[in-house]
Amino acid sequence: MDPHYQQWLSLFVRWLHVITGIAWIGSSFYFNWLDGNLRKPERKVDEAGLAGELWSVHGGGFYVVQKYSVAPSELPKTLHWFKWEAYTTWLSGFCLLVLVYYMGGAAYLLDEGSSPVGPSTGVAIGVLSLLFGWLVYHGLADTRLVDRPVAFASLGFVLVTLLAYGLTQVFTNRAAYIHVGAMLGTIMAANVFFVIIPGQRRMVDAMLAGKEPDGRAGARAKQRSLHNNYITLPVLFIMVSNHYPITFDHTHGWAVLAALSVLGAGTRHWFNLKNKGHRNKWILPVAALGMLALAVVSRPRAASAEGEPVAFETVWNIVSTRCATCHSSSPTDAIFTTPPSGVVYDTPEQIRAFAEAINQRAVLTQSMPLGNRTQMTTEERQTLGRWIAQGARIDGSPGGGPSAKAATTSAPSPAAPSDPAARARQVYEQRCAVCHGSRGAGDGAAAQTLSPKPRALSDAGWQKGVTDEYLRKVILEGGAAVGKSPAMPGNLDLKREPEAVDALVRLVRSFGE
């Protein structure tokens, strides 16, 4: 699908998902609040089987709601069902899962550098996790264990935590979070579709047939509805968590998810108790302290400023190679046609302005590059962190580098080999191989994300059509200098190393031999 239209489709489906999710969760909260606030009628009501009623005022009007222990003596002509909110929320959510995580080569789903499975297997694991999650829950909910709420909830918590841990071993942490949320959402929607609505339908059908409805079906539906109510806050947290990599991309992100799920369910329990008139004094304070403690213990260790000052040209090369394929005014990534979140790294000033964001996403949580598709190394992340810790300088002072004009004049790094051929190989492996491949075949780790695709330096026809001077110009000034893709960054810092540049030209020529 065209990336432009895919983004519009994703926007529409996400909008629909949020709207229907608000309607579904809102009705769940309302009816559970309603059950907890029903009172015996204060006026004479000539109606058998009435469990309670509630009077309320809203929007300038007065309302009275009545609930029956099982069912009224006769059905009204119009009976409103609450089901399409649940169905539409799940369907739109699953469509989002497909659009964001399963299409586009599963870029958001798998980490190319560490995932043990391919896209097809990853998608299969994702879909099966939703199915088996429901089957396991449904099987347990039909046992006597469900009558022991604490034991049932504890077992469910352990199983969900194990699932979260397992998925982080296969998926990106973000995808693992979303699939746990999707599994919980599937349980909620399946409860409505397979248990709650069929149970209510059987009661209605019995009344239409002139029979006494079986109250057990209503009680079972109510129990599943209560389960859904407790699941809502953990699911809502997961829905918004993808904006906060401090959670899902923590070293123990699965444990953060487990802790927040407990805090969310506990908060929901406090509200349910309050609705029943029980004024618990410790659950909310404990939940608040738990959130604060989690924020403190999950804080990642900041990079140290100690060590050799990091010149900005080093940072520029890392960002240009690993980040600018997406975060550019003209992205070359096959998925992102516009820079994500509007973040652009076209100039030194822009890189410095977003230094803290780079620190959070690329250094501390390592959630960027997405799925590490451009293969940013641990050493490069440490270099970025040290540069930021040293003040994120872009001038020529210690810890700095080129000015906004990118006029680099600094000497080679002390770690650079003195032999030109070895230096050329080092530069190629650090800066070029990620796109062009280690043997110049155009099959580097970032190649599939780029449009146009990187040049196959091993192409004999292309080798015959370019001069050595042309290659030098591309190496030093980048693709834009010869009318090619601006995604090919320049290496102005190599101007002080002409022998290394000549050796790099010879290395490129060797790929065509």
Image (spheres, rainbow, N blue to C red):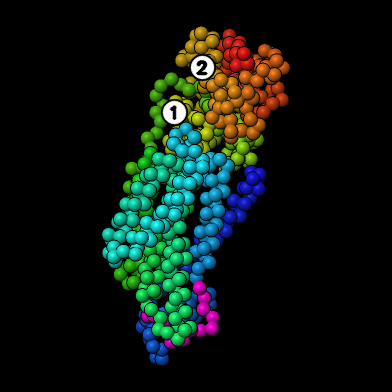
| Whether residue 268 is situated above or below residue 104 in the rendered picture | below
Tag 1 secondary structure: helix
Horizontal arrangement in the rendering, residue 304 relative to residue 325 (left or right): left
Q: Position of residue 37 (x, y in %)?
A: 38, 75
* Mark 2 crowdedness (10 Å alpha carbons): few <14, some 14-19, many ≥20: some
**Camera-nearest residue between 64 and 50:** 50
| Whether residue 396 is situated above or below residue 453 in the rendered picture | above
Q: Which quadrant: the C terminus?
A: top right
Q: Position of residue 49 (x, y in %)?
A: 38, 85
* Label ID, residue 355: none
Is residue 102 visible in the rendered structure shown here?
A: yes
- N-terminal of the pair, mark 2 or mark 1, is 1
Task: Provide the residue designation for mark 1.
Answer: 378
Quick check: marks 2 and 1 in contact, CB under 8 Å? no
**Camera-nearest residue between 266 and 148:** 148
| Whether residue 153 is situated above or below residue 75 in the rendered picture | above
Q: Residue at x 51, y 59 (%)?
A: 90
Task: Provide the residue designation for mark 2.
Answer: 426
Q: Identify which amino acid the numbered label 1 is placed on.
A: Thr
Residue 412 lies in the magenta-colored region? no
Q: Position of residue 134 (x, y in %)?
A: 41, 57
When asked about the image quadrant of residue 169, the answer is top left
Q: Residue at x 53, y 66 (%)?
A: 84
| Whether residue 478 is situated above or below residue 328 in the rendered picture | above
Q: Identify which amino acid the numbered label 2 is placed on.
A: Gln
Residue 71 lies in the magenta-colored region? yes
State which region is magenta. 69-81
Tag 2 secondary structure: helix
